[in-house]
Image (tube, rainbow, N blue to C red):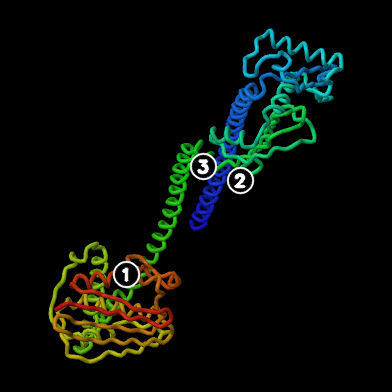
Amino acid sequence: MKIRIKILYIATICAIITFLCMQAYWLYVRYDYALTQTETDVYKSVMSAAESYHNTRNSLKSSRNPENRITDNYNTNISGDTVTANITTWQYHLNAYDILGKPRGQELTNLEKKHVAREILDIIDNGRKRDTLSAKEFTLTGVPRNFDIMGALAETRLDDICPFTEAGIDSCLRHSGIAADITLSTLDTILWSPALSRHTSVFDPTVEIALPYDILEKQAAVIVYHIPASEVLGRIWGVLLITVIVTLMLVTCLCLQIRTIVHQQRLDTMRNNFVTTMIHELKRPIATLKMCVSALDNERLSADIANRRSILADSREALDNLSGYFSKLRDITFNDSTLIPLNRSRFNASQAIRRTAAMISIPSDKEVRYSIAESDITIDADPIHFANIIGNLIENAIKYSPQQVDITISTAASEHNVTITITDTGFGISSKDLDRIFDKYFRAADTNHTPGMGLGLSYVKMLVEAHGGTISISSRKGCGSTFTIDIPQ
C-alpha cells in the first residue's frame, strides 16, 4: 500500500510539473503571437505617420518655391524580373517670374507654367545659361518591376526642396502614440521599400523599421521602437487571467489530492498505532485479572485469607485500571471539554501524585528518579481524572527521555488556585512544535520512531480545561520540559 501511495504521490507531482510546463509554453507562444501583432500594428502606425509627414512636406514644397520646375529624363531596360534604369534629373535656378516678367507673388496660370517649361527645355537643348541648371544622374540596376521610378524622382525633388528631418518624423510618430529612437543615415545599397525587422527577444522586444525617404540618394530613416510589456499583455489579459485561474484551480486540486493521500496515510499509521497501544494497555490489566482468577481457583491459595484479600485487591486494582482506560477512551471522543463528567472531591494533592507515580510502569531499560515535594495542600478535583493528568505527563517524560530521567513535581497553593509543576530532563521540544503540542494527533517530527497516537497531551489539556484550569509548557530542545497546571478552587 505504501508503495502504491508513493507511486501516486510521485505521479501527481510529475503531472503538476508537466501541466505547468505546458501552460508556460502555451503562454509563451500566445505572448509571442501578441507581440508579433503589436509589431504589425506599430509598423502600420509608422507607415501612417510617414505618409502624414510626406503630405505635410508636399504642402510646404509649393509654398516655399512655387516657380521652380525640374525636368527629368530617364530610360529603362527590362531584363527578366528586374529593370535597369538610367536617370538624369535637371533642376534650374531661374525664377519663373523673371522669365515671364511678372511681379512676384501672383499665381501662375497653366499657360504661363507651360511657357516656363518650354523655356527650360530650350535651355537644356541649346546649352545656353547652363550655369542656371544642376543635374543629378543615377544608374539603377536590379530595379523591381513594380518599382515606381517617377515616384522615386518625386521623393528626390521633395527632399531637395523640403528636407526630411528627425524632428518632423518624430512629431508625426508621437502624434500617433509612438515614442521611438530615430536615426537618419545613408545606406550602402538602395532600399526599395520600407523594411521591418521583428523582435529577437521576448524579454526586451524591439522593432526596427528602415524607412527610405530618398531612394535614389540611398537615404533612409531607421526607427527603433521598444515595445513595453504592458502593451503586449493588454492584448492577452483576458486569456492570461482565465489561464491563471484555471491553472491555480487545477494545481490546488492536485495539491489537495496529495494532501488527502498524505492525510489518509497518516490516519492509517495512527490507526495502527492506536490498535497497538490499546492492545498494550489492555494486556496488563487483563493479564493481572487472569492471574488473579487462576489464583482464586486454587483451593490452597484461596484458603489463606491474607492471600485471598491480596488477590482480590490486585483484581480490583486491575479492574480500576481497565475502567480508567475505557474512561480515557470515552473522554478522548469528546470535542468539548465541558461534556466530560466530573466527580469532584477534596484530597491531598501530593499523596495522589505519589500514588499515581508508583503505579507507572517503568521500562526495564530506563532509570527514573522522582522528586515529589511533600505538602498538605488539598485540591478539589476528580481523583480519577487528576491521576490521568499526572500519569500521562509522567509517562510522556519517561517515554521521551534518555535512559536516565529525573522528574521533579511540586505543588503550590494560592488564594484561588492550586498550581502543579512537573519538570523532566527528557529530550525537550523544539520551539517550532510548542504551539501545536496540545493539538489532537500532533506529534513532533523527531518522535515518529516512538510509538504513540498524539492524543496524550490533548487529553491532558481537555481534562485540565474540564476542571476550569489551564496548562502551559516551557521547553528547549535537549534541555527537558516543564508543564505548569493551574486548577481553580
Q: Is residue 136 above or below residue 407?
A: above
Instruction: Please give the residue where the numbered disc 3 appears in the rendered image.
Output: 230
Task: Give the residue at x 54% y 33%.
Answer: 175
Instruction: Please give the residue where the numbered disc 2 appears in the rendered image.
Output: 204
Report if the CB atoms under discs 2 and 1 are less than 8 Å apart: no
Q: Which of 345/157 is in front?
A: 157
Tell me: 37 left or right of 73. left
Camera sees residue 129: yes
Q: Is residue 20 above or below residue 74?
A: below
Camera sees residue 315: no
- Amino acid identity at mark 1: Phe
Q: Is residue 373 above or below residue 49?
A: below
Q: Sequence-wise, which precedes: disc 2 or disc 1?
A: 2
Tell me: 338 left or right of 452. left
Residue 301, quarter of picture: bottom left
Q: Which mark is residue 438?
A: 1
Q: Sequence-wise, which precedes: disc 1 or disc 3?
A: 3
